[in-house]
Amino acid sequence: MIRLTVAQAVVRFLARQWSERDGAERRFFGGCAGIFGHGNVAGLGQALATSTEDLPYRLSRNEQAMVHTAAAYARASNRLATLACTTSIGPGATNMITGAAGATINRLPVLLLPGDIFSTRAASPVLQELEDQRSYDISVNDCFKPVSRYWDRINRPEQLPSALLAAMRVLVDPAETGAVTLALPQDVQAEAFDWPDELFARRLWHVPRPRPERAALTRAAALIRSATRPLIVAGGGTIYSEAGAQLRAFAESFGIPVAETQAGKGALPHGHPLALGAIGATGTTAANTLAREADLIIGVGTRYSDFTTASRTIFAPGAAFVNLNITGFDAAKLSGLQLVADAREGLADLAEACAGWSTPAAYRERAAALTRAWDAAVDAAYALEGSPLPQSAVIGAVNAAAGDDGVVVCAAGSMPGDLHKLWRPSGPGAYHVEYGYSCMGYEIAGGLGVKLAVPEREVFVLVGDGSYLMMAQELVTAVSEGVKLIVVLVDNSGFASIGRLSESVGAERLGTAYQGRDGGPLPVDLAANAASLGATVLRPETVADLRKALDTARSATGTTVIHVHTDRLADDAPSSEAWWDVPVAQVATTSGTYAAREAYEANKRSQRPHLAPPG
């Protein structure tokens, strides 16, 4: 037995958790991020300050941001490692809810350790306590329940071992993972208890690779062999499973083109003859054209979001679906034939079951021709010049600077859509765009998490002025931790994508421009702000200057912010020729709104429920 406080026991336990897959072992927790207040300083703060365990503490500047950092760390680690996050009670805790939602939506493991009110209620109500008249057992931490995959409150030390083991069970399970919240009352954190030695033994969690059920595999192979125009949609599960080699072999063996979701981009490197690039509302015309013609969609590790399916308008009415996914929930979507399995193992088994079959040569040639046409359109967009700089040219310059070792990080605004269409990834892990939640403010915090997880790679953060103004504080964390980021701050004085969307639905770009009441520009200097936070700042004005600035940033040892101006009214990326369902007012005072409503109703008629049996 060993006598420790609850908080000390938590720290010791976390430091001794390891994950294993395919024989490779690694620490599951790369550290603990935190901001201290009265709800956790005497508990977890004291425990971390006096710990000799290998669990480094990192001071964050914003609670939401540190959860984004943890989620990005988990994604860059293919969900085999993450960070823990601790905050005080009250606003410190609730600030993490947005990050928790993003992690759960994106199926990424993060561990949240918010402080909580006194379990004994001796000093109730304490500072920052929510007094709920229905029950004294309710605190603001109950708000985490709908955005957590596992939630618990530790009211007694005896409850801790089972809660910690349950938390780890969920965190390492690729089918169940997401945010896990363990609420820790501040008095319980400081309470001592005699713990069994076994709780702190080195614990190795084996991450499974389940294989598909044989009967389902037989049915799926029969469906694939009967297809003449099949299309693979590769999602994030392909990358988390590290199934790139199996995907490539499967596509090449049977001549099946591959389209990619936001999370799956890079599953096949750009330039592969069967790589169509992005699919859906932000997709390429090559992928979307074949999607409309496909008689079979093979979804690998995708959750079929509305952007991927172009709000269910992109696939033909009679198309069948084979859905290979680690979760039955996602595999069952679009009435698909369900292959519940690890992506790598499932693709290998499917390849064996489909041996001897392939698509017609003419189909493969058509896919290649469509891709060549799209590549020419991207070349033209990358070559644009002008002042302010075209956003597509900015992306092209960053893409060239990233090379084979770079990782691009982005999350919200017009850039994720342009990146999905335009970015040419070198392979898995080179493209990191958070689009499950499309959370403004993720970018710099996420870039920090990526760099902590893969320090050998150059990390390029693309962030718009809107997202930057919401959460730039983690620049300070990057500087204080000595973590190098290359941040390209794209300043267009407002919201470009929402501005265009607003105009298209008759909302007249309301609230999408950063300007004074007189309509004039604001005296805001975001580059100076970045410099004040400790970053080196460069201000290129031409594309040639931008390329030089990117070279300078690559050779630097610290964080560099490259500030560029673009035009929010410009739309210089080629169209995806796909739709996204955003309702338009049925009644309005402007003729433009009525025209938009007519177009909306026309597109609605092309939506399909995909209810046909899976064959």
Image (cartoon, rainbow, N blue to C red):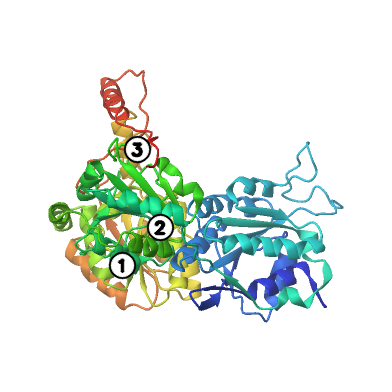
Question: Marks 3 and 2, Cα distance to the nearest angstrom?
Answer: 19 Å
Q: Is residue 294 left or right of residue 41?
A: left
Q: Report x, y in % for residue 457.
A: 37, 74
The kind of residue tagged 3 is Arg
- Mark 2 residue element: helix
Residue at 36% of width from left, 45% of height from top? 321
Dot 2: few (<14), some (14–19), or many (≥20) neighbours within 10 Å?
Answer: many
Q: In which quadrant of the rendered view does residue 556 lie? A: bottom left
How many angstroms separate mark 1 from mark 2 (CA)? Answer: 13 Å
Label 1 CA crowd tier, 10 Å (few <14, some 14–19, many 20+)? some
Amino acid type of the residue tagged 2 in the rendering: Gly
Q: Gap between marks 3 and 1, in whole Å?
A: 28 Å
Label 3 neighbourhood size at 10 Å, few (<14), some (14-19), many (20+)? many
- What residue would you read off at disc 2? 236
| Mark nearer the N terminus (3 vs 2) | 2
Give residue 316's position: percent from left, percent from top: 27, 38
Say above or below: 105 vs 268: above
Q: Position of residue 337 (x, y in %)?
A: 41, 46
Image quadrant in which the N terminus is located: bottom right
* Amino acid at dot 1: Gly
| Residue carrying label 3 | 312
Q: Secondary structure at mark 3?
A: loop
Q: Nearer the viewer, residue 52 or 88?
A: 52
| Image quarter (top left, top right, bottom left or bottom right) of the C terminus | top left
> Which of the labelled discs sits on residue 427, or is there none?
1
As drawn, is 474 to the left or to the right of 145? left
Q: Earlier in the sequence, mark 3 or mark 1?
A: 3
